[in-house]
Amino acid sequence: MFFLFILCTIEDRCGGENMNNPFPYSLDNKRYLTWNYYLQKTYGCKVAKVPLDARFTCPNRDGTKGFGGCTFCSAQGSGDFPTGYTEDLMEQFSARYEVMKHKWPDCKAIVYFQAYTNTYAPLKTLKKIYEPFLSVKDVVAISIATRADCLSDEVIGYLDWLGTKTDIWVELGVQSVHEKTAVLTNRGHSHEETVRVIEKLKNTSVHVCVHVINGFPWETREMMTETVRQLAKLPVDAMKIHMLHILKDSAMGRQYEKEPFALLTREEYVSLVVDQLELLPETMILQRLTGDGMADDLLAPMWTKKKTIVLNEIDKEMVRRNTVQGRRYEP
């Protein structure tokens, strides 16, 4: 399931870990395997993710497992889109892809089903949603954000078939491997379920990206690094690392407004992320190292609005330590 071309490129250029060449997986002097590098090497051009809202819901919102959704999630289900909303998915795609092309005129597109749980529907519904994009010009892949408890064997089999038509990514909202966090965030399923599903996806055509959130106020630094340490041992192709955003209209946001609690500082976050990068295998793609919530909805921490500064500080910390992704990885 790992990408052989990346492994060959790494071996050809640096023969494995080589501190004399700390940029083996980057086109811009990053000391970790960047998403941009992977896309450029795979498709030979700039590729942009185009987020869509297919009007799904979640089992911990509709009463199947609970109500209210995850406590950190806004009412929009992590699908806060600034432009181009319409019920019609092709119209959504066209409007947002045009925005991307203004910035990168020759870019290709990954269709990204982002809001809520995008496999939480009957199979016939999923087919109607996904398959029209197989024939859309310039679409090179489909990425589907979902939960481990919404990937039945039937759906996994279908996604495996879909992966023979185009590249398919499944993005799993893991957030933390700790069951205490699953309970306190109202996630509605266990980490054991996540591991089981990732193992099932291992032998399919599907690529897997896991989402991690740093900064839950009850988690220690050791707990956050342990999350990454455990995920590093699973057959996962990519990871997104986020800082916890406290958003208006979320359960955690309402709690924070009543009684603010401590959050990671930018300096703490940067140091933690570098620790986590050192624990990951050098072949794992980093799709994100920080996120950005909708500015008008963000209650805290405000330093996350300056994403470029956060990324630059991560680069500087890696230089200061003279380290690279995978430095402390243990299979």
Image (cartoon, rainbow, N blue to C red):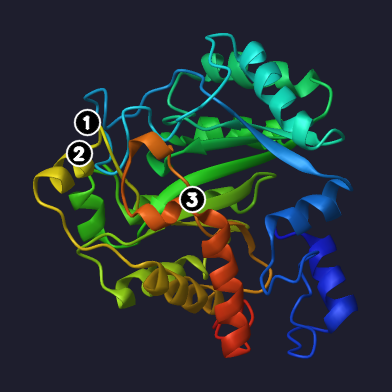
Q: What type is the residue that disc 1 sits on?
A: Gly
Residue 228: % across, % down: 45, 68
Task: Compare residues 238 and 195 and report the one nearer the observer.
Answer: 238
Using residue 10 as the reference point, say whether residue 257 is left or right of it: left
Q: Nearer the viewer, mark 2 or mark 1?
A: 2
Residue 130: % across, % down: 63, 22
Q: Residue at x 49, y 29 (%)?
A: 118
Which of the labelled discs sits on residue 291, or is there none?
3
Q: Residue at x 37, y 24 (%)?
A: 57
Circle 1 — which element? loop
Circle 2 — which element? helix
Q: CA distance from mark 2 to mark 1?
A: 8 Å
Q: Are marks 2 and 1 in contact (CB under 8 Å)?
A: yes
Q: In the rendered image, which residue does mark 1 sit on? A: 68
Residue 13 in the image: above or below residue 159:
below
Q: In the rendered image, which residue does mark 2 sit on? A: 251
Q: Earlier in the sequence, mark 2 or mark 1?
A: 1
